[in-house]
Amino acid sequence: MNTIIFDIETIPISFETLDEAQQKYLLKFAETPEDEEKVKQEMALWAPTNQIVAIGMLSVESGKGAVYYQSGDTVIEPYEKDGIKYESGTEKEILEKFWKALSFSQRFVTFNGRGFDCPVLMLRSAMCGVKPSRNLMPYRYAADIHVDLLEQLTFYNACRKFNLDFYCKAFGIASPKENGMNGHEVAPMYRAGKYQMIAEYCAGDLHATKELYFRWKENLAF
């Protein structure tokens, strides 16, 4: 079975690019400047107000993978590091590469994919005019096609959720956050032109998710 782990990194679009009605809609519950700033940061979480700047993929069986990422107006030649190939392109181009690669898999693994990565990938693809090659939102209460590790480790929200960093540490896995970077830094790093750092940060999440998947498969999967 070809099992693919994937993960995405997103940034918010510029609030100023939204029209007056959209801005008013987003800020209707914001009462303070701090509330408004929080809403603007949370725009990275929603497909109509974000863009995907990196998509990481890793084969469980081969241990090889790829990260497709945006690099603005900077031309960066493809390169390979630790079994991961890095290729830059526009959002539309990286989505096309993602769907082509995913079409060869039988199972895919995510961490909170059902709550974030999967709907964002499908909706952003539709908004960019890219046809998905797979349904990333199959029947929820089964793990034969999609293993969402957050759903599995909370038994479908029966118990408290923890983030990937917390679960990795609890299971004795090296956390991808130990280098000091986290998802909140992706947007400022992108604005600073640190495109390759974002891509390689995305790859770190792939390896951690793979190890967590092995723990689940060996000890909790039925």
Image (spheres, grey):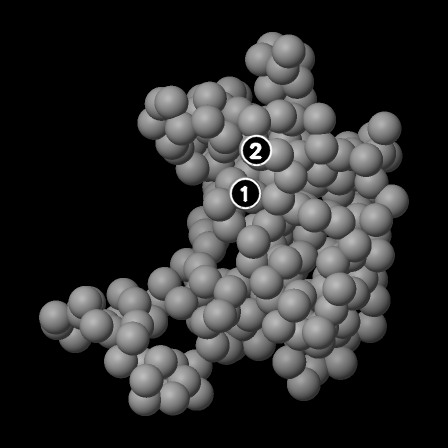
- The residue labelled by disc 2 is 140
Residue at image position (56%, 53%) is 119
Q: Nearer the viewer, residue 53 or 51?
A: 51
Please tell me in which quadrant of the rendered image residue 19 appears. bottom left
Residue at image position (35%, 67%) is 41
Q: Badge 2, how many Cα within 10 Å: few under 14, some, many 20+? A: few
Q: Hey, what amino acid is under mark 1?
A: Arg
Using the image, determine if residue 155 lies above or below residue 17: above
Task: Give the left or right position of residue 219, taking residue 161 as reference.
Answer: right
Instruction: Locate residue 26, reporting x and y percent.
Output: 30, 72
Residue projecting furthest to the left: 31
Mark 1 or mark 2: which is in front? 2
Q: Hey, what amino acid is under mark 2?
A: Arg
Task: Give the left or right position of residue 86, taking residue 50 as reference.
Answer: right
Residue at image position (43%, 87%) is 17
1 and 2 marks in contact (CB < 8 Å):
yes
- The residue labelled by disc 1 is 114
Using the image, determine if residue 187 lies above or below residue 148: below
Observer able to see residue 210: yes
Q: In which quarter of the image is the C terminus?
A: top right
Using the image, determine if residue 109 lies above or below residue 82: above
